[in-house]
């Protein structure tokens, strides 16, 4: 009998894309972020992808002091692998974006694999009331926003992370990002297994049509063969449809309030844990098993828990 395939669920419990006013469930304070992360891990998330926010105004922040306020609580209560963003905000320098990863040295860090338009302004049509002035400015400003991730930027992040034993969640928003990753693989700057997170449905990146998902998978197969672990992120209402398709095709999944505020048509998710449970229901309906944190560590060759500098 063949060995049962295990599926990694990554959960992004809060992030820089969405603003606090859009959902009362989006965690902002360190305790809220810790609680949301612990609940997601209890629901079945093997990896927790984490951003931080300034609790006074809800702005994304890469100041390590805020990460250090919630990470100890999470690590005390869960065995989940910790994934810290190097994205932060498009308005930050690479050095600012890297501070939490370089100082705390998590098992995984996210890495955007190319510069891109990052259109968030359509959210202004769906949400009319905002808690902070900066939120409207942030969304409106995305009409003229390029999220800069040059080859030099990527090489710098890879060097700083790899020197500390950090592996990466390579976020690929379009086909060109897969080719960028292939370049760094050929140069020896990254080592397999590559954790490739293909992102669907962000304006400025590839769409979320089933053909788009298949195209990204075919391209990654051709470029990386058996040297990568495939995962998907569907933005907004695309979260579960994309996750379902990818799971059936042999992929892993990422859910969470950073990527989507929804748990169904017109219904805001109560928390990221609810989205993890919905994804788990899909996986179990496909007769797939959810990977434990230690199984995910083995699949991705992570350095293991208790290595962070908290």
Image: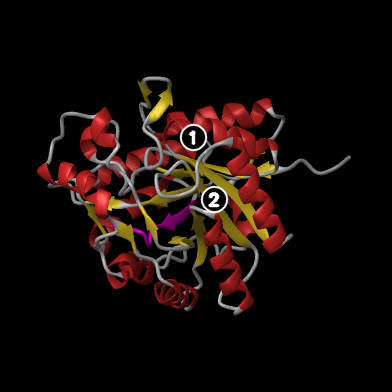
Residue 59 appears anywhere in the view: yes
Circle 1 Cα neighbour tier, 10 Å, few/some/many (<14 / 14–19 / ≥20): many
Q: Which residue is mark 1?
A: 239
Q: Which residue is mark 2?
A: 198
Using residue 34 as the reference point, say whether residue 110 is left or right of it: right
Q: How many marks?
A: 2
The quarter holding residue 65 reads bottom left
State the mark number for residue 170: none
Residue 13 belongs to the span the image colors magenta: no
The quarter holding residue 253 reads top right
Using residue 260 as the reference point, say whether residue 249 is left or right of it: right
Q: Quadrant of the N terminus?
A: top right
**Which residue is at a point 44% across and 71% down the rendered structure image?**
154
**Could you say whether the residue bearing mark 1 is in a helix, strand or loop?**
helix
Residue situated in front as seen by the camera: 153 or 161? 153
Position of 217 relative to 286 (above/below): below
Residue 87 belongs to the span the image colors magenta: yes
Name, please, the residue furthest toward the top: 266
Q: Quadrant of the C terminus?
A: bottom left
> In the rendered structure, which disc, 2 or 1, sits on the residue that comes first in sequence?
2
Give the Cα separation between the discs numbered 2 and 1.
Answer: 12 Å
């Amino acid at each position: 009998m063949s060995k049962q395939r295990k599926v990694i669920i990554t959960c992004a419990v809060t992030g820089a894309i969405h603003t606090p006013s859009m959902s009362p469930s989006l965690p902002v304070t360190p305790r809220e972020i810790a609680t949301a992360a612990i609940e997601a891990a209890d629901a079945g998330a093997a990896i927790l992808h984490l951003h931080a926010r300034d609790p006074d105004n809800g702005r994304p922040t890469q100041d390590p002091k805020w990460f250090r306020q919630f990470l100890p609580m999470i690590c005390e209560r869960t065995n989940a692998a910790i994934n810290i963003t190097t994205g932060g905000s498009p308005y930050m320098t690479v050095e600012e974006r890297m501070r939490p990863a370089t100082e705390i040295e998590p098992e995984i860090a996210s890495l955007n694999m190319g510069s891109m338009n990052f259109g968030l302004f359509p959210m202004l049509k769906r949400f009319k009331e905002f808690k902070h002035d900066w939120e409207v400015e942030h969304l409106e400003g995305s009409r003229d926003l390029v999220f800069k991730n040059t080859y030099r930027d990527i090489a710098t992040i890879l060097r700083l992370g790899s020197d500390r034993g950090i592996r990466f969640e390579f976020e690929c928003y379009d086909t060109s990002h897969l080719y960028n990753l292939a370049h760094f693989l050929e140069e020896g700057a990254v080592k397999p297994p590559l954790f490739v997170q293909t992102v669907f449905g962000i304006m400025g990146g590839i769409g979320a049509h089933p053909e788009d998902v298949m195209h990204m998978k075919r391209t990654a197969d051709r470029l990386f063969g058996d040297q990568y672990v495939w995962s998907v992120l569907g933005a907004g209402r695309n979260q579960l449809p994309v996750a379902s398709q990818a799971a059936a095709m042999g992929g892993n999944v990422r859910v969470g309030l950073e990527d989507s505020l929804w748990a169904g048509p017109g219904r805001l998710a109560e928390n990221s844990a609810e989205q993890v449970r919905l994804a788990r229901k899909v996986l179990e309906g496909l007769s797939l098993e959810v990977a434990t944190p230690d199984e995910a560590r083995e699949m991705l060759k992570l350095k293991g828990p208790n290595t962070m500098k908290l």
